[in-house]
Amino acid sequence: MRLARVQHDGGAAFVTSKDGRTWHTLATPARDLPEAIDVLSLGQDQTGKEVEVDTTAVLCPVVRPSKILAIGLNYAAHARETGATPPPRPIVFAKYPNSLNDPYGDVRIPPSVTEQADYEAELAVIIGRRAKQVTREQALDHVFGYAVANDVSSRDWQRADSQFSRSKSADTFCPIGPWITTTDEIPRPHDLRITSRVNGEVRQDSTTADLIFDIPALIEFLTSTITLEPGDVILTGTPQGVGLGFNPPRFLRPGDVVECEVEGLGTIRNRFVDE
């Protein structure tokens, strides 16, 4: 099943689809993603009325998460391209909710503030059940579904701050979507092709098999100290091919269009504009 959030009746509504073509509202409307997950967990038919969905009007499906946790240097080849040693344990940082953006929304980059905006195609994991001190064997039972994300980054801020959160949490710096695909449709999340394109040119082309720490390992590590709630997001890292990894680096400029795609989950497409 796919769970999307779309413009509807002058507002926004969560809708579901079993085939990617026919969409229905929820029988019980939900104000945010945790409520939508709760509605769908009731185990009964929650299909409402059929609606026409213009895919260009799809909104970010993640609404009011308590946390967006991201993992740095989690693809072996990406660690090598940055000259870093693969980390012995996950590198965790936060992206704040103000960074959330629609799957086809504009990403605002102020050139007067950052000259090194960068893209990072990522597999996003959406938590469906509260998770605290979960073992890796139990971990996937707490996942609701998966989506595509772009962990947009300002490399000059990152270098100046000597940490990640501010450089990755500017407004609009976290497009997610185009919908959330539930786990039953993605039985092998560690064998998915992940790509990014800038103005049609392929920049990243890898698979989630290159993850250093897989999804169960990340959930076990995070929940050892942090309680994950329904609707929380884990960004699992990005493969090689980011702008920083080129010599010379190839950073984004206003007018560039970035597409991020994960096999079986769809494609998000964002134009970078001068704020």
Image (tube, rainbow, N blue to C red):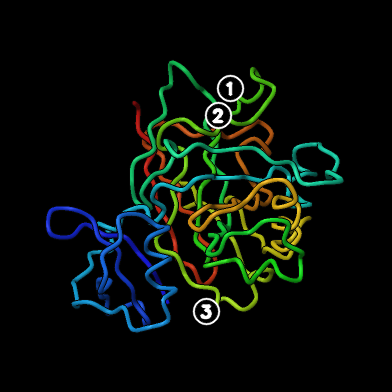
> How far is the residue under mark 1 from the one under mark 2?
5 Å
Residue receiving disc 3: 185
- Identified by mark 2, the residue type is Ser
> How far is the residue under mark 2 from the one under mark 3?
34 Å
Residue receiving disc 2: 154
From the viewer's side, name the closer residue of 89 and 224.
Answer: 224
From the viewer's side, name the closer residue of 262 and 129.
Answer: 129
Horizontal relation, residue 123 to residue 40: left or right: right
> Residue, x 80% and y 44% (percent of image)?
80
Q: Position of residue 45 (x, y in %)?
A: 33, 83
Residue receiving disc 1: 157
- Identified by mark 1, the residue type is Trp
Please say if the residues under marks 1 and 2 sit with CB atoms less than 8 Å apart: yes
Q: Position of residue 108 (x, y in %)?
A: 38, 32
- Residue 238, relative to residue 156: is it above or below? below
Q: Secondary structure at mark 2?
A: strand
Horizontal relation, residue 116 to residue 102: left or right: right
